[in-house]
Amino acid sequence: MVAARAHLYLGGGETCRLVRSSQQGTALILQVLLQGRLRTLVVKQHGPTPAQTTVRALFEIHETLRAQDPRCADLLPPILGYDEVLNFTVREYVAGVPLLVVLRRALLSRRLTNAERYLRMAADALSAINAHPAADSALPRKAKDNRTTLSSIAISLRTTGLSMDEFGSLPPEIERRLPTSFWDARGDRLLLCDTQPKNVIVANDLTLRFIDLGYLEGHPAMALAAFLVALDRLGLRTPSSRRLRVLESWKRIVVDTYRASPDADSVSGLVLYYPFILLQHLERHLAARPAFSAYLKHYYGKRLRHFAASLTDAPFFASTRSTPRR
């Protein structure tokens, strides 16, 4: 059916001929021939999203964002069409390599320059996308207040079985590090649902494209934290000391680049959202890989320990406040 409509999605007057179709993750990839030119479409069926948006609302939010901001138009491929009955969207395929693959190759080869350049580009891209208020879109207002997220950290610490003797004091320490106004607020920005490097393509023209097209309302630090925790996960399979040092340097590059953007104040929110996202990933990993629970708790616990030390010993996740709130 999509192939039969492809000429409409692609703006052509002639009917397309389907050449090949294949499954790639949760997406259907269609190669069609239109006016003698081979084109590739990505058909993505959408399940329930965190914001519970329809595909029509997703299309409107996405295309409005692209129309309002030329930077976002470059970073986000257009949605060519959608089907409200079958709940899918259609976009053109972005030729290139996932940023995740680029980073893995850099870790193996020890040639880090290109990886660092793309990480700076990704941080700049996130700051551009995160700059837009959710109120300007059709997105339902469903963001939780920051204090509720803090409560979730305490629950996750107990759920994952991490040592409460070591980490039990972390939630009150996080609360102490941010001003009262932060805890009374809730995230109000338009964010991409999944900003992990696997969903970022280094296109053939060496620019970046974010290809997981879904949105939610939240604090910008949540999207930034998701990207940082995805970098942490690169060390799960081969956690050598050298690779972990590289990953920490990469995280610092991302944070420092974001801190130099107009949205610099949002970096302080990592004090809350980095441990929140880290523990969410640990919970999901424990549920999916119970046989490796001891190792997973060790690895994620080490990352959480490094974060806790950074609250007092290093400027990595420093608040924009010069001193903690008493």
Image (cartoon, rainbow, N blue to C red):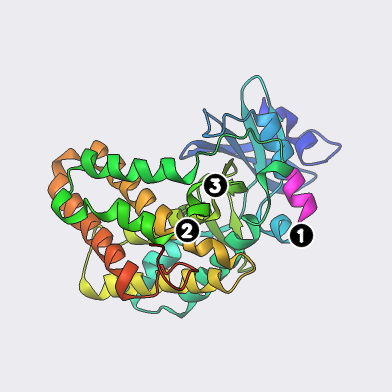
Q: CA distance from mark 2 to mark 3?
A: 11 Å
Task: Check if mark 1's residue and mark 2's residue have beta carbons within 8 Å.
Answer: no
| Amino acid tagged 2 | Pro
Foreground label between 3 and 1: 3
* Residue closest to the eye, 308 or 213: 308
User: Considering the image in quadrants, where does the N terminus appear?
Assistant: top right
Estimate the x, y position of residue 311 in percent, counting from the top left.
33, 67
For image coordinates 39% across by 61% down, the residue present is 177
Foreground label between 2 and 3: 2
* Residue closest to the eye, 112 or 179: 179
Q: Reading the chain from its start, which is encountered first: label 1 or label 2?
A: 1
Q: CA distance from mark 3 to mark 1?
A: 29 Å
Q: Reading the chain from its start, which is encountered first: label 3 or label 1?
A: 1
Q: Is residue 274 visible?
A: no
For image coordinates 66% across by 44% down, the residue present is 134
Q: Quadrant of residue 157?
A: top left
Residue 113 is left or right of residue 65, and the answer is left
Span of residues in magenta: 63-70
Q: Which residue is mark 2?
A: 179
Q: Residues within 10 Å of mark 1 (few under 14, many from 20)?
A: few
For residue 70, the mark is 1
Q: Residues within 10 Å of mark 3 (few under 14, many from 20)?
A: few
Residue 15 is left or right of residue 108, and the answer is right
